[in-house]
Amino acid sequence: MKFSVVSKDKKTNARVGVLETPNGVLNTPAFLSVATLASIKGLDTFEMRDIGAEIIICNTYHLMLRPGADLIKKIGGLHKFMNWEGALMTDSGGYQAFSLGFGMTDKVGKVVNENRQSKKSTTEKNQSQNTKLAKITEDGVKFNSHIDGSLHNLTPEYSMEIQNKLGADLIYVLDECTSPLADYEYTKQSIARTLRWAKRSQEAHKNNKQTLFGIVQGGVYQGLRKQSAKEISNLGFEGYGIGGSFGGKQMPKIVESVISILPEEKPKHLLGIGEIDDILLAVERGVDMFDCVTPTRYGRHGVVLTISGKLNIFLSKYKSDKSPLDKKCSCLVCQRYTRAYLAHLCRSGEINGLRFLTYHNIFFMIQLFEAIRKSIQENKFEKLKNNIIKKWRK
Amino acid sequence: MKFSVVSKDKKTNARVGVLETPNGVLNTPAFLSVATLASIKGLDTFEMRDIGAEIIICNTYHLMLRPGADLIKKIGGLHKFMNWEGALMTDSGGYQAFSLGFGMTDKVGKVVNENRQSKKSTTEKNQSQNTKLAKITEDGVKFNSHIDGSLHNLTPEYSMEIQNKLGADLIYVLDECTSPLADYEYTKQSIARTLRWAKRSQEAHKNNKQTLFGIVQGGVYQGLRKQSAKEISNLGFEGYGIGGSFGGKQMPKIVESVISILPEEKPKHLLGIGEIDDILLAVERGVDMFDCVTPTRYGRHGVVLTISGKLNIFLSKYKSDKSPLDKKCSCLVCQRYTRAYLAHLCRSGEINGLRFLTYHNIFFMIQLFEAIRKSIQENKFEKLKNNIIKKWRK
């Protein structure tokens, strides 16, 4: 992997970069669409390419359980398995310690299973039992599969082994993502463990075609965030993730202090942040990569992203609206279909409804990031940011 | 509408025709893919066009309830609403008298609601109540909406009014589709009523850009089928549907006797028949048009159509199978994805899984009908038919 910053905003820390991977070049700031189970929900890899997506991220936890890393390796790796000819990233599976562990007991965070059909039963089951499915030890994360209940032990070494088999271009060390409700003492112990796991991951990483990213944790505690950033960057990774919970409004401040410590010349990825205003505030502070399920999840639930804010297709005023989702949008869905038709499809639970909204939303994100990069190169990022945030927050 | 037979098989009654509609030409024998709610489940109209589909059929019953004929007319008609630039047909809504009426009490036939999300609750509700949602009178079909329970009275005149508003190229008279369990006496009364409804439909039909098809009924009773065919053809329609239940193995015999009575120069449509062997036996007897939900429904349930028979993607042997769904198929899905990947998607309940299988299945049907037409023109239909039926029935 090779990363170079090609342009910097004069007023802010926003920057444009180029990240070269063995399977494709990535212009940053970049949005990584989430293909949890090696499939963007409702869009195929060729549509992704047509839309202009340069990178996709898949979830190690989900793929290790189904269909399994060995099977994907046998088919020729994740790129070939899903037929994606672009850059590809996998996470470490550590985030699921959050979702399956305290995510259930503390009732925070997202459900682990993005899948519509099994989500309900899994979530309901977990919530009714109200017990942890995962336990963190020094060794790794012990968890029960949400599919069949089988016991797994995800250690740093095992996460590397799986990710090496999956063969994504960019991969992650195993980390612990602490609860938003975790106290200072627990979080302190946790970042020490995450550091030890980072070292073990580094030592276990065997495939030099894949680039390993480290992750900064530390929850909402500025001091711990800085400590984590310093310690993780001392390990000398080629890229850095900033993960965990940021306590909502404190996110920009935390990102700012972490980024000032991480090596400037390396790409930085803010994990799981996908709301437009948050993205802009993070780009302003120097973040290069984002991933989030919001564009696809919103699409499945009738929420449409536009430059002026969100639009809920289920509002009755759209029932007979002949205009496209977004008049300013040049995506195929906006060229082809009316709000009235899309409202009808979504209301009827038609597969095409969620597919079309998801298509539009991902197109929107890709276009937004293109606009962000352009604005940075033209030193107009702050104007763009203020304009969009004003509309989105009104 | 203009229909002309361009080629006849020498050994059988199979024939190739060209049907011209205001919105597109249709080569027959033709397969009409079903877009119940103005949407093929999982495929968009542009994919349908790429695949080579020339015609789509929508369901009046479903569209009158949601989003309503007035709304569709306001948007510019069904073609514009769903953005389909090809030939389009609507049924009369009469079939739902079957599904909502005795279909529930006799526990036969398909459920009325093709929609995945609401199907379950509707079906379960109906089955548990075990009461008819529809009642047939001389006036028409009184039924309760499966969506909100509201009362509707679908008369021949109202069906015409709705279909005129929807604006499909080919439309249907209102008919009663009798139960497979209906006795001779009931069926006799029913075809007399269907005849009266056909006349009323004819008189009420107001849009001369749309071509009205009559429907032959008569259940499993050869004599009644012949009588219905004679009486309906005396009304002088431009096209004829053959509807209702055929008692399984008796279908070819019934179709044969009906077709010998209907005017030779008019197109004939065998409603709701979609199994490959049945289609071939009906083509052999002179049927020109078919419609069925099987390719899309199979696709959503992991069943793949191939020239050698059905393939169930959930069989464990496909889990690590690197070959395409069908080696002989040139569809995009077979060019792009392995059985292993598709099995994974279907097993995981991914939208793309059912979408890809549906795409392949519709492509298969369109290709099959192209092969059927070619074989008729080359006087090789019987060979094609025997080859396929042998494979499908083994």
Image (spheres, coloured by chain):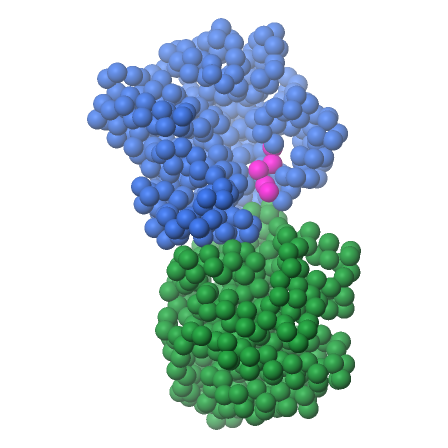
Chain colours: A blue, B green
Q: Where in the figure is residue B325, as x and y percent of width and height?
A: 53, 60
- Whether the magenta-drawn stretch holds residue A123 is answered as no
> Residue B20: image x %, image y %?
38, 78
Residue A115 part of the magenta-drawn span = yes
* Residue located at (65% from left, 24% from top): A107
Specify the segment rendered in magenta. Answer: A112-116
Camera sees residue A296:
no
Q: Is residue A255 left or right of residue A134?
A: left
Q: Is A145 displayed left or right of A345 in the figure?
A: right
Which secondary structure class fits the magenta region best?
Answer: loop
Residue at position x 33%, y 43% in the image: A327
- State the image coordinates of residue A48 (x, y, percent, origin top left): 40, 44
Please report the residue visible at 44 percent of the width from the left and 28 percent of the height from the top.
A275
Residue B186 or residue B82, whichever sits in front:
B186
- Asked where in the image residue B112 lies, by quadrant, the reply is bottom right
Placement of B251 over or under A336, stated as above or below: below
For the point 70% across and 68% down, the residue is B135
Q: Which quarter shows the C terminus of chain A?
A: top left
Q: Is residue B69 above or below residue B229?
A: above
